[in-house]
Structure formats: structure tokens, C-alpha cells
Image (cartoon, rainbow, N blue to C red):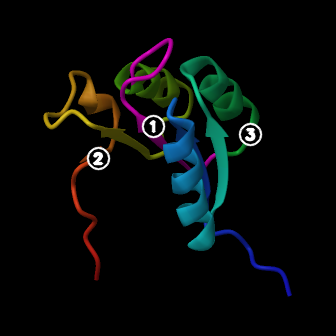
Amino acid sequence: MSVNPLATILCIDDDETALKIRKMVLEMAGHSVVTAIDSASAMQVFTSSPVDMVISDHLLQGKTGTELAAEMRHLKPTVPIVIISGMVEQPEGMEQADLFIWKGEAPLFG
């Protein structure tokens, strides 16, 4: 029996270890995950693949997560975009994204 993925999520982070862990956790939850390690490869995946959601680190090579979100929002305005960062305060440009998560924040359950 095959399991249909819940959503296809594009994860973007230049920290390859964090990216692998995030991918593994999301796949264990039933999602299909595609990854990118910089803004250029993220845009290539975003424009050429069906993506239901984006989770992006804020500090990336090439562009910030919020700059990337603005570009993505222009192309596909209905795709939810989550920015994650080690920065405690929300970065400038967050109006282009749907949610900000501080990496030190504990997840909410239930």
C-alpha cells in the first residue's frame, strides 16, 4: 500500500545538517520534501516543481529569506511561506511571509 504525501514542502537552509533533520522530520510526518541550500537553487525548484509550502531560513547565500519570500509571493501568491531564523526578532520584510519561527522556540503540540 502506498501513502499519499500530505503536502510537498520546499525546505531551504544553507546548514545542510539542519536541512537533513528538517527533511527527515517532515517526511516522517507524511510530507514530500524537496530541499535547496541557497536562494538560486530554491527559486529553480520553486518555479519548476509543484510546491505546497515553503520553509526557509532567513540568512541564506544570495538573498535573505524575506527577499526570497517576496519573489516567491509574486510568482505563486497562495503558497504559504514560513521564515525560520536564529534571530529573536522578526526580520524586516516579514509581511511577505505567513509565519516567523525563532529557531530557539519550542514547538507547540496539541
Quarter of the view holding residue 19: top right
Q: Which residue matches tag 1?
A: 56
Q: Is residue 105 above or below residue 46?
A: below
Type of residue at label 2?
A: Lys
Say which element carries label 2.
loop
In this image, 102 relative to 61: left or right?
A: left
Residue depicted at 59% across the width and 54% down the height:
23
Residue depicted at 64% across the width and 33% down the height:
46
Q: Which residue matches tag 2?
A: 103
Q: Which residue matches tag 3?
A: 49
- Which span of residues is magenta-colored? 51-64
Type of residue at label 3?
A: Ser
Q: Residues within 10 Å of mark 3 (few under 14, many from 20)?
A: few
Where does residue 24 sit, x and y in percent of width and height? Answer: 60, 61
Q: Is residue 68 above or below residue 34?
A: above
**Residue furthest toward the bottom?**
1
Q: Residues within 10 Å of mark 2 (few under 14, many from 20)?
A: some
Looking at the image, tell me whether mark 1 or mark 3 is earlier in sequence order. Answer: 3
Q: Is residue 85 above or below residue 38?
A: below
Where does residue 39 sit, x and y in percent of width and height? Answer: 55, 21
In this image, 54 relative to 32: left or right?
A: left
Type of residue at label 1?
A: Ser
Residue depicted at 60% across the width and 72% down the height:
28
Looking at the image, tell me whether mark 2 or mark 1 is earlier in sequence order. Answer: 1
Looking at the image, tell me whether mark 2 or mark 3 is earlier in sequence order. Answer: 3
| Magenta span contains residue 88 | no
Instruction: Using the numbered discs, state the Cα–Cα distance from disc 2 to disc 3 in whole angstroms.
Output: 27 Å
Q: Is residue 76 above or below residue 71?
A: below
Residue depicted at 76% across the width and 79% down the height:
3
